Image (cartoon, rainbow, N blue to C red):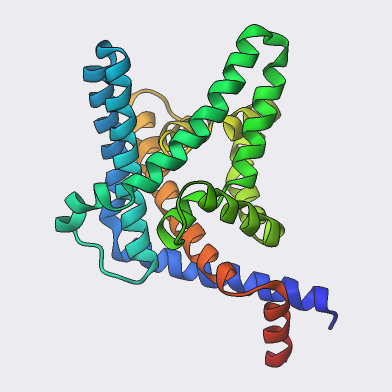
Amino acid sequence: MSDASRLVRATLELYGDALRQSTTALGRHIWIIGLVPAYTLGLQFVTGLAAPLGFAGGFVIFFAMAACVSSFLTLLGEAVGHGRVRLEELGSSFGRYLSRVITVFFLFWIVRLLLQMTVSQNPDLLWLLIAVNSGIFIVFNPVPELIYQGHQDGVALLQDAVQFTRDNLLEWLVPLAFLMAPFFLIDLQVGFLVMARLDIHNGLELVQSALATWLPFSGTARNLVATVIASVVIVWAMLFRGFLFKSLARSGRRQRIFASRARG
């Protein structure tokens, strides 16, 4: 068996392990599913109160969003670390990774602000905004996992994300392609627009919209079913990513080939 074949086999085994572990973790912490729409409703409530406050309200919304992301990543970290996620620990989770999340949000905000200013002066460059945001989505895709599994902050954390993507491009992006497939099946342009817009704080809305397109009924029932399914998909996908990241970060391709060869 060639080294390429061994690497493919080893990678498929990693996917299988991540699939089993994420499904088990989801079953053990099924209540986390309810937090996805809860965070979304909470942010909508805060936005409604803070939006009229102008610049100060923008800061309130920013910190609320960062706190919700910190909470979600904290719970994911406990589940991926095979810990027992308890509801009574929810309060402390909002501050666990708050500084890291705020720093990452701020760095991405600067880049996107500059892009939006450029596009606003020249609307013909809208394609550039979509292309750069799609590139950011791919290159910095493992940032959420690095926030709760890594040890760096700020620019160093983003550098680690670039390095991880470079070292594990195919292994990391193949599952991502399957997760993004429903959007591209709706329409190729929709797929790229979602890649440009998708972020950890608006995932529910985008996944819910995609699912609603495929559901055979309409009205309130469709929205409710789409929300439940979207919440399950998001939590399961993030758990899968967490376990896969953990496995990929602990071994390089040569190590995986060697381990596959040792197993025969």
Answer yes or no: is residue 211 visible. Answer: no
In this view, the residue in front, 168 or 32, is: 168
Q: Is residue 225 above or below residue 49?
A: below
x, y (%) of residue 257? Answer: 73, 80
Q: Is residue 18 above or below residue 163?
A: below
Quadrant placement of the N terminus? bottom right
Q: Residue at x 67, y 17 (%)?
A: 126
Q: Residue at x 33, y 35 (%)?
A: 65
Residue at the farthest right position: 2
Q: Is residue 252 left or right of residue 245?
A: right
Q: Residue at x 48, y 56 (%)?
A: 146
Q: Residue at x 55, y 26 (%)?
A: 112
x, y (%) of residue 9? Answer: 71, 75
In this view, the residue in front, 150 or 48, is: 150
Answer yes or no: is residue 236 visible. Answer: yes
Query: Residue 116's image quarter?
Result: top right
In this view, the residue in front, 212 or 93, is: 93
x, y (%) of residue 92? Answer: 20, 53
x, y (%) of residue 76? Answer: 36, 57
Query: Residue 236's image quarter?
Result: bottom left
